[in-house]
Amino acid sequence: QLQLVESGGGLVQPGGSLNLSCAASGFTLDYYGIGWFRQAPGKERGGVSAIRFSDGRTYYANSVKGRFTISRDNAKKTVYLRMNSLKPEDTAVYYCAAARQWGWTMFRPSSYDSWGQGTQVTISS
């Protein structure tokens, strides 16, 4: 019913910036929010940022707070992730996902039932 497509990944040097997009298609009225997650080789998928649809409230993992910014364009049905001051440890496949509800945390992957295909972000000199 709901499809998500990430774009904007690529290779950037440490300290650089990158903009990711998550475009949604299909029926979205039953969804509570969108989250960005990332997964590096050999590591668990972890939450990066999230936005609540009802009021646009934003949330950030401590590791990216002050560097990343999540935003939305309701007309385009798109959520963005602006990544600044990128570090090598930010290297991962980045996914966007939609949740019908959050539990005790907005960064639990099992709360999300619709996922994009992922986009590779590589930070290297």
Image: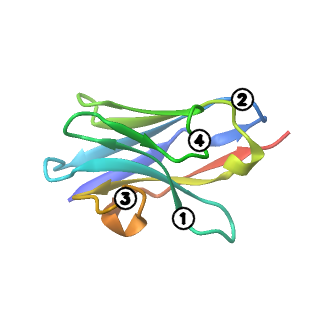
Amino acid at pointer 3: Thr
Q: Tell me how far mark 3 sits from mark 1, CA to CA.
A: 14 Å
Query: In x, y percent, where is residue 28?
Result: 18, 48
Q: Which residue bears the numbered disc 3?
A: 105
Q: Which residue is mark 4?
A: 64
Q: How was this image coloured?
A: rainbow
Image coordinates of residue 58 in percent, x first then y, are 37, 37
Q: Amino acid at mark 2?
A: Gly
Precedes in sequence: disc 4 or disc 3: 4
Q: Secondary structure at mark 1?
A: loop
Can you tell which of label 3 and label 2 is closer to the viewer?
A: 3
Nearer the N terminus, badge 2 or badge 4? 2
Position of residue 98 in the picture relative to residue 108 (left or right): left
Q: Nearer the viewer, residue 22 or 71?
A: 71
Quarter of the image that includes the N terminus: bottom left
Q: Separation of disc 4 and disc 1 at Cα?
A: 15 Å
How far apart are labels 2 and 1 at the CA level? 23 Å
For image coordinates 37% across by 69% down, the residue present is 110
Q: Amino acid at mark 1?
A: Arg
Q: Residue under circle 2?
A: 16
- Going by the numbered disc 4, the residue's amino acid type is Val
Residue ID at (54%, 64%): 45
- Secondary element under disc 2, as helix, strand or loop, is loop
Q: What separation in Å lies between label 4 and label 3 (alpha carbons)? A: 17 Å
Q: Which residue is mark 1?
A: 45
Q: Earlier in the sequence, mark 3 or mark 2?
A: 2
